[in-house]
Image (cartoon, rainbow, N blue to C red):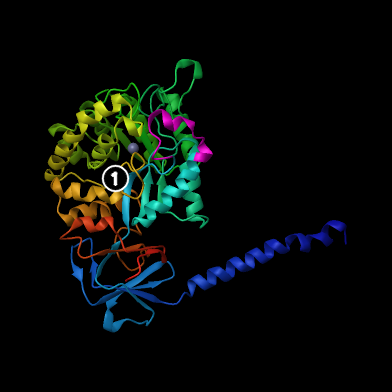
Amino acid sequence: MTRFTRQLPHRLLPFILGCFLASVTAIAQSTDALSALSAARILNVETGELLRDHVIEIKGNRIQGIVRASNASTTAVIDLGDVTLLPGLIDAHVHLTGDAEAQGYQGLAASVPRNTLFGVKNAAATLRAGFTTVRNVGADGFADVALRDAINEGDIVGPRMRVSGPSLGITGGHCDNNLLPPQYDHSSMGVADGAAEILKNLRRNRKYGADVVKICATGGVLSKGTAIGDAQYSSPEMALIVNESHRRGMKVAAHAHGTAGIKAAIVAGVDSIEHASLIDDEGIKLAAEHNTSLVMDIFVSDFILAGGEAAGFLPESLAKERMVGAAQREGFRKAHAAGVNIVFGTDAGVYTHGLNARQFPYMVRFGMSELEAIQAATTKAAELLDFDEVGSLKAGHFADIIAVPNNPLTDISVLQTPVFVMKNGQVIHQVKKP
Ligand SMILES: [Zn+2]
């Protein structure tokens, strides 16, 4: 026996032990005892029906079924009392990586690793607020991929994530960082001009773990030197992005505020328009025809304008926000009335993480029923994000379940104060009854 083979068992021991422990954990999960959640009301978000005298049975990380309380096949019932149970909420437009408190020039000081660590904190805050799934749109250095993977592997606590990696955009556009003068020679990681650079960046994003593609179709509010109405990627460039992304199984989310850029992105075939601030009647018609989802962040405007320059927002950003905020809310009202698919997305990261649900009352104020607003953040968001096992309380779905006080169908604001959050069958947050 050589020295090498004699050493082999010893060297393999931690590995073998690791495999053994892993298989024990897997068996323990697969035979997890049945448990159940009971509450005064369970909301079927697809129909609006409120079930009473029922329990949700959970096995491992999945919902086993919803049955009459009298037929429950377990006595391990967590009774949450006079609350409403509904599926974990979904935010289709967040920026978890980075410091939400650092706007404008303040944001330049943080490294990618530091921004990733801010992401750890922000992911936990988002989950505790009842958002068990998010789509992160734009992160330099693939900080979002690291965050998603660490959550999926159980190293840290956070929502399920779809991530884009670096956003694609033109030099000097909204997805570039234009704060520094030329001698710093800075260009954001996702900047890609023309067909060759676009394909290279898109394929690199896929290589390093992106699920979705984020592009900048127009100027933006918070970027320096970009005009809201400025269409950035050309129509052929966007068509190329859509074609290559779809061929590779990725959807395309297009940041677009200006009217012309919104329409060009819809015609190019993107899957969602982010912001859609200055959408006009023709744009609404096009979105309906192309089945394009609109992700309209109609709360954030109040936050930006209240924070002002003291919060680090550039004077030009505040001027732009004043141009788009009110118009966006009217566009939301019209698009909803026209039957366009609207998906819940907030731009959290521009404001404090965990306040995502503040947008719900705005959605109701600007035309949605309470149920429609909830569907925008559950069934509809799950569809846009290609998650088919979240977004409703169904047998076989992941046990991502929240409880809110009273009845969200009569008072949407209760979504801001979940008293119980479960993700993947694990209790993340629970307010103890007094
Ligand atoms: Zn954004």
Tell me where residue 232 appears, x and y as whole percent.
Answer: 32, 24
Kindly give the residue lying farthest to the top in the view shown. 183
Q: Position of residue 115 (x, y in %)?
A: 48, 40
Pinpoint residue 392: horizontal percent, then vertical percent: 29, 61
Residue 209 visible, this orientation: no
- Amino acid type for the residue under numbered disc 1: Gly
**Which of the 4 image quarters holds residue 277?**
top left
Q: Is residue 165 magenta?
A: no
Q: Is mark 1 within 8 Å of ligand 1?
A: no
Query: What residue lies at 18% left-to-right and 62% top-to-bottom?
Result: 48
In terms of secondary structure, where does tag 1 sit?
loop
**Which range of residues does the magenta coloring cover?**
99-114
Mark 1 nearby-residue class (10 Å; few <14, some 14–19, many ≥20): many
| 75 lies above or below 141 | below
Read off the residue under disc 1: 345
Q: Position of residue 423 (x, y in %)?
A: 40, 61
**Vertical arrangement, residue 425 with respect to residue 162, above or below:** below
